[in-house]
Image (cartoon, grey):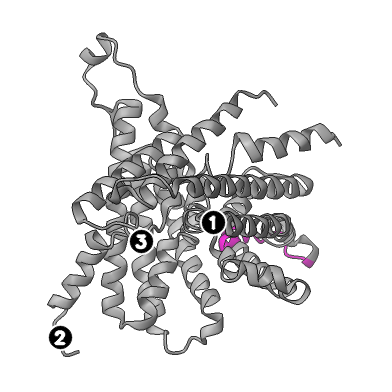
Amino acid sequence: MGESLLSKKNQKIVKNGLWDTNPVTFQVLGICSALAVTTQVKTAIVLSIGLTVVTAFSNVVISLIRNFIPSNIRIIVQLTVVSALVITVDQILKAFAYDVSKQLSVFVGLIITNCIVMGRLEAFAMGNPPWKSFLDGLANGLGYSGVLVLIGIIREIFGAGTLLGFHVMPPAFYANGYVNNGMMLLAPGAFFLLGVIVWVQRSISGYSES
Amino acid sequence: MDILHYVNLAIKSIFVENILLAFFLGNCSYIACSKKVDTAMGLGVAVVFVMVICTPACWAIKHFLLAKGALGWAGLSNVDLSFLIFISFIAVISAMTQIVEMLVEKFSPALYSALGIFLPLIAVNCAILGAALFMDQRNYNFLESIVFGFGGGIGWALAIISMAAIRKKLAYSNIPAPLRGLGITMLLSGLLSMGFMCFAGIRL
């Protein structure tokens, strides 16, 4: 290795994943679970951790064996590696956080088909050495987690008046006729919110689709 | 055997609990492929097809191989392989997609070239795996799993085709630059999903 572990190039990889080419707002990947698990911050955080771990380690594994995979069956190889990792995450969640795992229901399993994982494997890990791939997976996972937790915070505060289960809306609001916005907890609220977040992020980063 | 039960399940999975607009499954290809009505239609049909086959196939795999005690016919009645559900479901789905792709190529080259890249991509469409996992979680029986696969597929196709139609009309509107593409599609999906929520009032 000619370069240090956190050289300029590697820092750029991290920054790309976190902000410039954020998986949700720029690459349009992994929207499904970004919306489905964000009615509460807790589930959002747990899924984020799971996804970041799976992305980072599947990137490493695929990057290690990238020169031995025949290109016409690579999707199946990738799916196998990813599902093995997801099974591990699922079993760990079931053992140590059973309630959350029940709440997440099918969405832990759906990490397998989460486009971020496959997208990064195809776009990055198939052509880069393990350490870079690990950084890329980690950064993209964290970039995704950022959006997920942000949506979770907004939906939980305005939809239920709580944050991580604690009441944060002042009782005085309710006394003066404030009502929790139930729409936030339903599907349309999630769609609107993500639309607005994408709008804001793209206004700041200056990216737009033609 | 109550026919009405299955009709209700179909209506529920198409409208009330639309797999895309209520559970957000299959959102990625929904956004990527809803720019033209033709491609949306083709992808919709392909998804219905794969889903109708895969959901019951996964049911069979689960009940004859993976569930606790399912291996009783092989003398292994204490074996519980249900932790293998994810990996075997995704294997079934990708194999099935491959078979469907080869069949379509053999028997209908026109449809094959129209669908192009989208056929293999169905393997990683979360709607399919999602439907299979919901089937597992809700303990559907064999017939129910066929109906649920069909209804889920039709619901998904309905959503992507209507979004493609809306986006076609949108081509003439002046949308703020950062909102173009993903942003406006999400806002529209919100409206669409609100429309579909009205079906929730139906008592089935």
A150 w.r.t. B85: above or below? above
| Depicted A12 relative to depicted A156: above or below | below
Q: Are marks 1 and 2 in contact (CB under 8 Å)?
A: no
Quarter where residue B74 is shown = bottom right
Q: Which circle marks residue B36 in the picture?
A: 1
Q: CA distance from mark 1 to mark 2?
A: 46 Å
Q: Which residue is mark 3?
A: A27
Q: Amino acid at mark 1?
A: Lys
Residue A200 lies, with reference to residue B119, above or below; the image says above
Residue appearing at x 35%, y 28% in the figure: A159
Residue B76 colored in magenta in the image: yes
Assign a secondary structure to mark 2: loop
Inspect the image, locate mark 2, and give the three-letter code of the amino acid beneath it.
Glu
* Camera sees residue B100: no
Q: Chain of mark 2?
A: A
Toward the front, the furthest residue is B172
Q: Where's residue A46, x and y in %?
A: 36, 49
Residue extent of the magenta highlight: B74-87
Q: Is residue B64 above or below residue B91?
A: above
Mark 3 crowdedness (10 Å alpha carbons): few <14, some 14-19, many ≥20: some
The chain carrying label 3 is A
Write down the residue under mark 2: A3
- Give the secondary structure at mark 1: loop
- Which residue lies at the image location 63% right of the left edge and 36% below the top edge? B15
Which amino acid lies under the numbered mark 3 shown in the image of this protein? Gln
